[in-house]
Amino acid sequence: GKLVIATHNPGKLAEMRELLAPYGIEAVSAGELGLGEPEETGDSFQANARIKAEAAAQAAQLPAFADDSGLAVDALNGAPGIYSARWAGDSKDFNAAMAQIERLLQERGAAAPAQRTAHFVSALCVAWPDGHVEEVEARADGTLVWPPRGTAGFGYDPIFLPDGHDRTFGEMTSIEKHGLPPLGLGLSHRAKAFVKLAEICLAG
Ligand code: ITT
């Protein structure tokens, strides 16, 4: 059957399409269907993912897949967190949002890598028109670098160095960011969450 990918973020959409590709599911984006964007009024990643998935499932009368995600910086008490998109403003200026994080880290004297730890979170939700939902969440841990490195990916990728790697997400191909064989999917927050979701409802 057909699945709506309930995102208006082109970087996410590309990753979600890649993750779904092996399953042979016909996926259509919220943008392609002309669906609006619901207000993200939730106070957690999971709540916002569910708001987006349920709104799209109801509007399209098709199963809908949504991701709510963000970067949580330990020295900033988890900010920007669920406000990660909003920190970039209406102009979606992630260079400014990354510079803002760096300014706050420097104000706190966070120079050593151990003071610059952060994690990405991805909450995924699939909602069906009959009201059924499946929800999962995963994280990827790492350290923030400055200046930004690499032009791949989107959002905060150029400052995020995942644990155990020497290149930022911005320096990785999307395949590497998802997690390369032999380990397969399981580096990025989104790929890890997708594996959990696939175990629940896409594999069968
Ligand atoms: P939709 O709600 O339409 O899906 P959005 O960009 O508004 O798009 P979110 O509210 O979930 O989505 O915001 C998440 C933000 O966190 C996103 O804009 C990115 O800047 C950042 N982010 C999430 N995953 C990321 C990743 O894998 N790499 C870099 N930045 C990421």
Image (cartoon, helix red, strand yellow):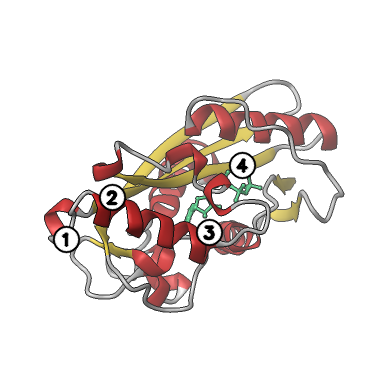
Q: In front here: 204 or 68? A: 68
Kind of residue at disc 2: Ala
- At horizontal 69% and vertical 29% (from top left) the residue drawn is 54
Q: Which residue is mark 2?
A: 118
Disc on the earlier residue, 4 or 1: 4
Asked if the residue at label 1 sits under 8 Å from ligand 1, the reply is no
Tell whether 71 sits left or right of 42: left
Q: Which residue is mark 4?
A: 66
Q: Are marks 4 and 2 in contact (CB under 8 Å)?
A: no
Q: Position of residue 186 (x, y in %)?
A: 34, 56
Q: Are marks 4 and 3 in contact (CB under 8 Å)?
A: no
The reply to whether residue 204 is in sight is: no
Q: Which mark is residue 52?
A: none
| Circle 3: element type | helix
| Circle 4: element type | strand
Look at the picture and state if 161 lies above or below 186: below
- At horizontal 71% and vertical 37% (from top left) the residue drawn is 63
Mark in the foreground, 2 or 1: 1
Disc on the earlier residue, 3 or 2: 3
Q: Are marks 2 and 1 in contact (CB under 8 Å)?
A: no
Q: Are marks 3 and 2 in contact (CB under 8 Å)?
A: no
Q: CA distance from mark 4 to mark 1?
A: 36 Å
